[in-house]
Each structure stands twice: as structure tokens, then as C-alpha cells.
Image (cartoon, grey):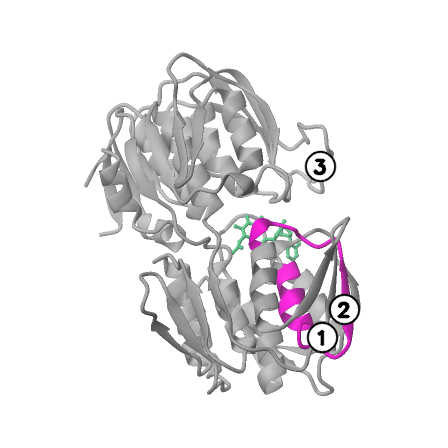
């Protein structure tokens, strides 16, 4: 059930649509907890991370139902209650969403619980920034065998914080906690990803007062109450870029309806440098391989507005088809090149290095993390037996299998449902030979 047989070697061509961003939607759903009236979230994709968020909210007494519009969720937080710890533990599985419930639950109920967290196995993915921020707001955190129990005996108060790294999750944590904390919060070194700015838009609709200053500084003036929101989630720029890389790697032509140029500027520059062509139109962006050789390049992943780490793996597959040496320096996660081993087994020539092979020395230099990759191309890929390691790596395996000659068996494809809506239907619509 969880295995796809992929017959590669054919260009992917056709039109597909992307919906709301997986990296925004569950957070906006959590924000609904803070309202005193129901919220409506639109453009929600049918991905399993949304199901996990729905389940967790339901465990806390929020009713989640389908709205009138396709892809609309109605979230009613009027009956919020403490969830059973064992049920949260069982339901959360490998998801990291429970940690973002902390601020809103501490406000609403005075207590919260974080089970042992999972998420994609890419580096340690610690939560120290989250916990430190919550402590600064006045939360008390107790460690127990089943997870972390949090309380706020004196309520949550605004504070001055500075993140050691502009973490997306920790910035969201601060926003979701500060909006109804007493007094003003100043956050320095905040993440400014488009999904964060969209979450700020959601919170502003609810009545929050958040100002975004230059140099990654946010100021949040706590308010007493927030109401529900109506919001259309911004499109998923990671899914859009994944399909663009699939078009490039397979020599195809994919029109991605819903793709938004403004959130993809950095990706589009790289796509063009590698030799891909694109056309931005009113409904989306069409990406294609114009024929002829692709060009190698040197690239560093970075926080926004840099080249996003989640764009890296799908692009790496396309770079195996580019002429010359490409250099990738991963500066956001220390361990995001594990997926290249499978590409090498398919015939790619990729070598990993612990050094920072880029202009910017990063946090992972001199620490034995294999966080730089050199890809030599072009190489012919051959079909292989693959087991999916994580969400983005998993989609890259599919692209590699579709690029390769021969048949591949790709196991563990369920993981891809976490972030790619109906990916099997979309692949079929693009002419992929899968079963
Ligand atoms: C989010 C995205 C993920 C994306 C990432 C970076 C979601 C659901 N996921 O993940 O797709 O790749 O942003 O754009 O939105 N860190 C710590 N301590 C912490 C928190 C983070 O050291 O408490 C480190 C992480 O280990 C990592 C870096 O900070 O090295 C960035 O992580 P972060 O931005 O928090 O990623 P997520 O929010 O988990």
C-alpha cells in the first residue's frame, strides 16, 4: 500500500495546482484557539499535517468542520478544554505541531503539555528556543516521563527576546504567545518567511497589534481579547518549487497553478541560472526545460529571503543532470544530505563534506556535520529500490525515480502525504508511469 512502482525516463508535462502552504495552515489553525468566535481558513490542502492539527485541536475541545467552500475549514474554539495527555501523545505521533499549542493553551487554560516531538529526521531539531521563550513569558516547565508539562501560575507577560537563530517555529511560538500576553513583547532576530508574515496577517485580522520593523525586529502589543478570522492561506511555495525541479530533472514542462512569484523570487533566480525557463502568468507559473545542457552552480541554503532549505533536495536531483560541478552548502539544518546516498546508488556522483563550502561560514562548520555537497554531472540515473527518509527527501526520490531509466520501487510514500496534496493523482496527470 505504501509502495510505488515508478517507470522513469519520461518528461513530466501538464498542469497541476498547489493550494495553501503546509507551513502556514496548521499554525493558522492553532491561532484559531485564541479567538472568542469561530474562524474560517480557506485554501487548506488535504495533507496529513492538517489532519494531525485538526485532531489535536479536537482533543482540546475545538470543533473543526468543513466549510461551504472546497478547502475551507471552520474552527470553533468556544469549548476549549484540557486534553488527555495520553491521547495527545498518541495522536501527535511524529508531528511537531503540539509545541505551538503551548502559548494559546496557557492563555486559555493555564496549562499545556508537549509530548516527545518528532517531525522529519533531519538533524536534532531541538526545541530549546521555544522553551526559553516560553519561560521568559512566565511559563513554568516541568519534565515528566511522558513529556513536558507547562503552567503559567502568574499569567503570561510580554518580554524582550532575541533568538540565537531566526527559527521559524520559535518565531511562531513567540507570536502566538505574545499577542494576548500582558504588555509589550519585542522579538529580535525573528524569522521573516512568507508563512510567518501570513500568520501575522491572520493574527492582525483577529485583533492583534504586531509591527514588523527592519533587521528582523517584531514588536507585539498584547491585547485582552482576539476574535475569529477569515483567511485564505498563501500558496505553498515549497510544493511549487518541487514541481519546478521535477520539470527540470525530467526534461518536462509543468504549469503550476497557484504558484506565486513574490514568494519564489530567490528560487526563480536559481532556476533560471541552472538553465530552466519559466513564464509567470495570472494563474500561476509554468516551468520547463528548454532543451540543451543545464548549468551547474554554487548555492547556499539560508533563512528567508535566502534559498530555502526545503527547495534544496528537489533541486539537487535536477543538478545531477547539470554539466559540471555544483556545490550546495546547507546552513539551516546540519544533517539534510542523507537523501543523497540513494541518489548515488542510482548513479549520481555526489560527495559530502563537513567544511562550509560557501561564502558564509555557518553554525555547522568544524563540527563534523556533512553539510556541504558537491554534485558532478550530468549523470544517467538508473532505477533503484528506495525507502523514503523524510518528507522533502522523499519527494526528491520520486523525482529521481521519474528521471531515471528503468523501474524503481519507492517505499514509505505515505510520508509524502504529510506535505504534498494528492501527489499520486498529480503525478498521473503529468504523465508519470506509476502504480
Ligand atoms: C520550519 C518548516 C520547515 C523548514 C524550516 C526552515 C514548518 C512546519 N516547517 O521548520 O519546513 O525547513 O522551518 O525554514 O513550518 N532550532 C534550534 N532550537 C529550536 C528551534 C530551532 O536549534 O528551539 C534550529 C533547528 O535545529 C534548525 C534551525 O533552528 O537548525 C531552523 O529551524 P526552524 O526554523 O525552527 O524550523 P522549523 O520551524 O522546525
Q: Are marks 1 and 2 in contact (CB under 8 Å)?
A: yes
Say which of marks 2 and 3 sits in front: 2
| Image coordinates for residue 119, horizontal then vertical, percent | 49, 57
Q: Nearer the viewer, residue 334 or 220?
A: 220
Tell me which segment is drawn in magenta: 170-195
Question: Which residue is the site of mark 2?
Answer: 185
User: In 3D space, how far apart are the residues under numbered discs 1 and 3 (Cα atoms)?
Assistant: 39 Å
Q: Quadrant of residue 171?
A: bottom right
Q: Is residue 135 left or right of residue 115?
A: right
Q: Is residue 71 left or right of residue 98?
A: left
Question: Which residue is the site of mark 3?
Answer: 365
Q: Which mark is residue 222?
A: 1
User: In 3D space, how far apart are the residues under numbered discs 2 and 3 (Cα atoms)?
Assistant: 33 Å
Q: Secondary structure at mark 1?
A: loop
Q: Are marks 1 and 3 in contact (CB under 8 Å)?
A: no
Q: Residue furthest left?
A: 435
Give the answer, above or below, for where 6 lies relative to 376.
Answer: below
Amino acid at each position: 500500500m505504501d509502495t510505488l512502482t515508478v517507470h522513469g525516463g519520461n518528461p513530466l508535462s501538464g498542469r497541476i495546482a498547489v493550494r495553501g502552504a503546509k507551513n502556514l495552515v496548521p499554525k493558522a489553525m492553532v491561532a484559531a484557539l485564541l479567538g472568542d468566535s469561530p474562524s474560517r481558513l480557506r485554501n487548506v490542502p488535504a495533507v496529513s499535517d492538517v489532519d494531525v492539527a485538526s485532531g489535536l485541536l479536537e482533543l482540546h475541545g475545538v470543533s473543526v468542520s468543513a466549510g461551504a467552500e472546497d478547502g475551507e475549514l471552520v474552527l470553533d474554539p468556544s469549548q476549549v478544554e484540557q486534553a488527555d495527555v495520553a491521547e495527545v501523545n498518541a495522536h501527535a505521533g511524529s508531528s511537531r505541531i503540539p509545541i505551538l499549542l503551548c502559548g494559546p493553551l496557557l492563555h486559555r487554560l493555564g496549562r499545556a503539555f508537549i509530548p516527545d516531538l518528532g517531525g522529519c529526521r533531519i538533524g536534532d531539531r531541538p526545541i530549546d528556543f521555544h522553551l526559553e521563550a516560553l519561560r521568559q513569558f512566565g511559563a513554568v516547565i516541568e519534565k515528566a516521563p511522558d513529556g513536558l508539562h507547562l503552567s503559567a501560575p502568574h499569567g503570561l507577560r510580554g518580554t524582550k527576546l532575541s533568538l540565537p537563530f531566526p527559527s521559524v517555529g520559535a518565531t511562531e511560538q513567540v507570536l502566538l504567545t505574545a499577542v494576548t500576553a500582558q504588555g509589550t513583547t519585542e522579538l529580535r532576530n525573528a524569522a521573516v518567511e512568507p508563512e510567518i508574515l501570513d500568520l501575522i496577517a491572520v493574527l492582525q485580522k483577529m485583533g492583534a497589534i504586531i509591527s514588523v520593523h527592519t533587521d528582523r525586529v517584531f514588536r507585539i502589543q498584547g491585547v485582552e481579547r482576539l476574535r475569529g478570522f477569515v483567511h485564505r492561506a498563501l500558496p505553498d511555495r515549497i510544493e511549487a518549487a518541487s514541481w519546478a525541479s521535477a520539470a527540470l530533472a525530467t526534461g518536462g514542462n509543468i504549469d503550476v497553478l497557484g504558484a506565486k512569484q513574490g514568494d519564489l523570487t530567490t528560487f526563480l533566480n536559481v532556476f533560471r541560472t541552472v538553465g530552466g525557463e519559466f513564464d509567470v502568468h495570472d494563474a500561476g507559473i509554468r516551468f520547463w526545460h528548454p532543451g540543451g545542457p543545464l548549468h551547474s552552480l554554487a548555492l547556499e541554503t539560508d533563512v528567508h529571503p535566502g534559498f530555502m532549505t526545503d527547495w534544496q533536495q528537489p533541486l539537487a536531483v535536477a543538478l545531477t543532470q547539470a554539466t559540471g560541478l555544483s556545490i550546495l552548502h546547507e546552513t539551516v539544518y546540519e544533517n539534510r544530505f542523507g537523501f543523497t546516498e540513494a541518489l548515488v546508488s542510482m548513479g549520481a556522483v555526489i560527495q559530502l563534506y563537513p567544511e562550509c563550502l560557501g561564502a558564509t561560514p555557518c553554525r555547522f562548520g568544524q563540527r563534523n556535520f556533512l553539510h556541504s555537497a558537491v554534485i558532478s554531472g550530468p549523470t544517467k540515473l538508473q532505477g533503484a529500490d528506495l525507502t523514503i527518509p523524510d518528507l522533502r527527501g522523499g519527494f526528491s526520490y520520486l523525482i529521481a525515480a521519474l528521471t531515471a531509466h528503468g523501474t524503481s520501487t519507492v517505499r514509505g510514500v505515505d510520508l509524502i502525504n504529510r506535505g504534498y496534496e494528492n501527489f499520486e493523482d498529480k503525478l498521473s496527470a503529468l504523465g508519470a508511469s506509476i502504480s
